[in-house]
Image: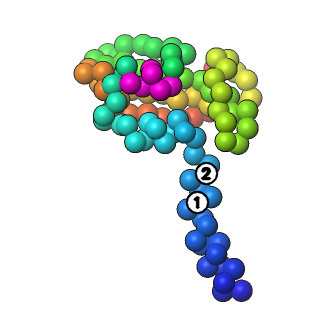
Amino acid sequence: MRGVVRLLVALLPVALSACTSWQADYLTERMHKASQEEVAARLGKPTETKPLQGGGTEWVYHYFPDSLFNYAYKGHPFEPDCQEYILTFDDRQVLAYWLKQECIE
C-alpha cells in the first residue's frame, strides 16, 4: 500500500503539468521578456487588441480545446469550452501579465 501511495505522489507533478496548455507554458516562461512581435509569431494574430489608459496594450486570444492536449484557434468566443487568454503589454511592448479564463460575452 505504501508503494502505491509513493508512486501516486511521485506522479502527481507529471499529471498536473500535463493539464496546462502549451500557450500557458509559453506565456509563463516569456513574461517580462517577450515582445509583442515574439508573442504574435508564436500565438498568431490576437482576436482583439485595445490600448490601455496608462500606456501599453491588451491583447485577447480565444481558443477552443478540441482535445485534452490540442488547442486550436476558433475565433468564436461564445462556443462551449472556449478559453480566453488576456495579455497585457507595457508601454515598451513587452509582455507584462497574462490571464487565462473561460470566454465571456
Quick check: can you spot residue 3? Answer: yes
Q: Which residues are magenta?
A: 38-43
Tell me: 63 left or right of 99: right
**Around disc 2, counting alpha carbons within 10 Å, would you say few (fewer than 14), some (14 to 19), or many (20 or more)?**
few
The percent coordinates of residue 27 (x first, y second) are 44, 36
Secondary structure character of the magenta stretch overall: helix
The residue lying toward the viewer, choosing from 102 and 29, is 29
Residue at x-position 34% and y-position 30%: 34
The stretch drawn in magenta includes residue 85: no
The percent coordinates of residue 93 (x first, y second) are 30, 21
The residue lying toward the viewer, choosing from 28 and 102, is 28
Q: Are marks 1 and 2 in contact (CB under 8 Å)?
A: yes
- Distance from label 1 to label 2 (Cα)? 6 Å
How many numbered circles does the render carry? Answer: 2
Amino acid carrying mark 2 in the image:
Ala
Residue at x-position 71% and y-position 86%: 1
Residue under label 1? 14
Residue under label 2? 18
With respect to residue 88, does 49 lie above or below? Answer: above
Q: Quadrant of the C terminus?
A: top right
